[in-house]
Image: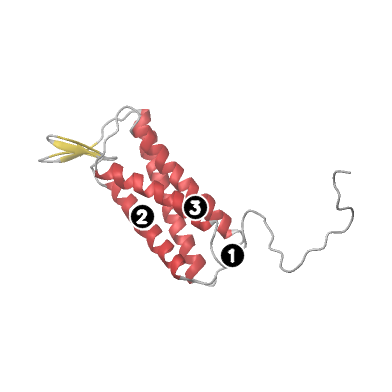
Amino acid sequence: MERNRKSDVLVILCITITVFHLLSVSLPYWYKYQDGSEGLWRICTEKECREYEGSSVTFRAFRSMEVLGLLAAAIVSILLILKFYTNVEILHLQAALAGLCLFTGLTIMTGIFIYGFNEITMYACYIMSSIAALTFFLAAGYCTNIEGSTPIHGSMHIEGPVQIEGPTNIAG
């Protein structure tokens, strides 16, 4: 596949956003209060951090969606590297990338909606995950329009004059 500046930007952007989302999943800054903060895996005070002992079903669903989004983001980054920097040809990779980018954005956004159902908190991890989800939605749009690739929507490009045979008057 032919590389260009836009494809390089897409690869670098997806890898960077995947790292951002990794940080949002691992850091304890989803919720901050006066004496500490909470993350997906632990609660921290000024003196110590401890693991969650018990969590609700909705919190586990939120955590699962964020981790699933992280795995999908890593797969998108790997597939983009394969597409633009190797000679590996994978059938229907462009459509798979667009679908996987949408899936990644939707899983991250679903996790955010589950978490923010009762109260929206605009702390570091929440913002990083929101940016990650929106970026993967934009990447999905770009993946459907990569130069030098076969369009995934099934349209044809016809060059030259087109002759239509048969009746030209459809109405009558």
Q: Quadrant of residue 57?
A: top left
* Quarter the N terminus occupies: bottom right
Q: Earlier in the sequence, mark 2 or mark 3?
A: 2
Report the residue at 40% width, 40% height from top: 109
Question: Which sits in the foreground, 35 or 123?
Answer: 123
Q: Amino acid at mark 3?
A: Ala
Q: Is residue 136 above or below residue 48?
A: below
Q: Position of residue 50 (x, y in %)?
A: 20, 38
Would you say 29 lies left or right of 129 here?
Answer: left
Give me the C-alpha separation between circle 1 and circle 2.
Answer: 24 Å
Q: Nearer the viewer, mark 1 or mark 2?
A: 1
Would you say 27 lies left or right of 33 here?
Answer: right
Q: Amino acid at mark 2?
A: Ile
Q: Position of residue 86 (x, y in %)?
A: 50, 71
Give yes or no for contact between labels 2 and 3 (Cβ–Cβ under 8 Å).
no
Question: Which sits in the foreground, 19 or 171?
Answer: 171
Question: Which sits in the foreground, 150 or 110?
Answer: 150
Residue holding disc 1: 149
The label shown at residue 17 is 2
Q: Badge 2: how crowded within 10 Å, few (<14), some, or many (20+)? A: many
Q: Earlier in the sequence, mark 1 or mark 2?
A: 2
Residue holding disc 3: 140
Q: Is residue 148 above or below residue 132?
A: below
Q: Nearer the viewer, mark 2 or mark 3?
A: 3
Give me the C-alpha separation between circle 1 and circle 3.
Answer: 14 Å
Residue 72 visible in the displayed image: no
Q: Position of residue 169 (x, y in %)?
A: 86, 49
Report the residue at 42% width, 45% height from top: 68
Kind of element beneath mark 1 = loop
Report the residue at 46% width, 54% height from top: 139
Q: Badge 3: how crowded within 10 Å, few (<14), some, or many (20+)? A: many
Question: Which sits in the foreground, 7 or 157?
Answer: 157
